[in-house]
Amino acid sequence: MINIMFIAPPAAGKGTQSDLVTSKYNIPHISTGDILRDISKEDSELGSYVLETLSSGGLVKDEITYKLIENRLKKADCKNGYVIDGFPRTLDQAIEYDKILEKLNYSIGKVFLIEISKDVLEKRVTGRRICENCKAIYNINNEESKPLVESVCDLCGGRLYQRKDDNIEAFNNRYGSYISKTEPIIKYYENKKVLYKIDGNKPIEKVFKQIDDIISEVDS
């Protein structure tokens, strides 16, 4: 059973690495955000509550999130492992996650901490540009991922735009929140000896190789 968790600051490439792991090992990528969005579409009291909470920018009660995650982990496609994304975000959630795993007779598995310098993250965020048509992503601060023509998509010729939250102020807020909330989680998993530190400053394929080598080594 391959259970994987990623801890990473904003724009560190956690989603990309999650997709690479799930693709190679044929295990589901469990995103708490996706679970909540799916529930919000249901015609039920819970669906209405989640929809209203998400729409207002609030946080769904932890008790509800715990139950939704437990129900998702009970599904058959998780029996051989999974990648969990967006949870836990606090030490209290990490402790509750342990209780859920114990109830299901699952192990924590491997927790990967993607370490990356703040300067690199800042350049990724502020330089990110997205095609309004095909959603291709570019970065004007990186020679390898810059568009050939400024503000024009190489693939479809669509207009490139910058997300409203891809600015220094928003990045600093998100980064500060990450540091304050996740540092206790990092120590928690270090003490459990399940934390693996990954150099996220390297190219995508080299970051994945570090992760894959650890998964293969531990499970061989």
Image (cartoon, rainbow, N blue to C red):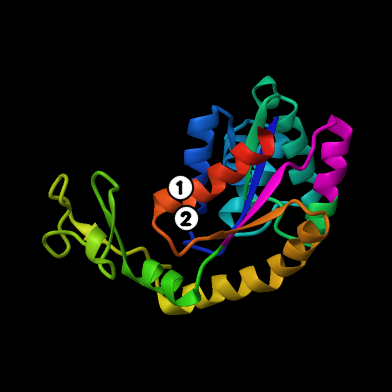
Q: Residues within 10 Å of mark 2 (few under 14, many from 20)?
A: some
* Residue for point 56% across, 44% down: 213
Residue 4 percent coordinates (x, y): 65, 42
Residue 104 percent coordinates (x, y): 84, 31
Q: Are marks 2 and 1 in contact (CB under 8 Å)?
A: yes
> Does residue 19 appear anywhere in the picture?
yes
Q: Nearer the viewer, residue 192 or 149?
A: 192
Which numbered disc covers residue 16?
A: 1
Q: Where is mark 2, residue-wise?
A: 13
Residue 70 percent coordinates (x, y): 77, 35
Q: Which quadrant is home to the N terminus?
A: top right
CA separation in Å, label 2 and label 1:
5 Å
Q: Nearer the viewer, residue 37 or 143?
A: 143
> Does residue 31 appear anywhere in the picture?
no
Q: Secondary structure at mark 1?
A: helix
Left or right of 23 in this view: 136: left
Residue 84 percent coordinates (x, y): 64, 43
Q: Residues within 10 Å of mark 1 (few under 14, many from 20)?
A: few
Amino acid at the residue labelled 2: Gly
Q: Residue 170 colored magenta?
A: no
Height in image: 168 above or below 20? below
Amino acid at the residue labelled 1: Thr
Magenta span of residues: 96-114
* Residue for point 48% across, 73% down: 171
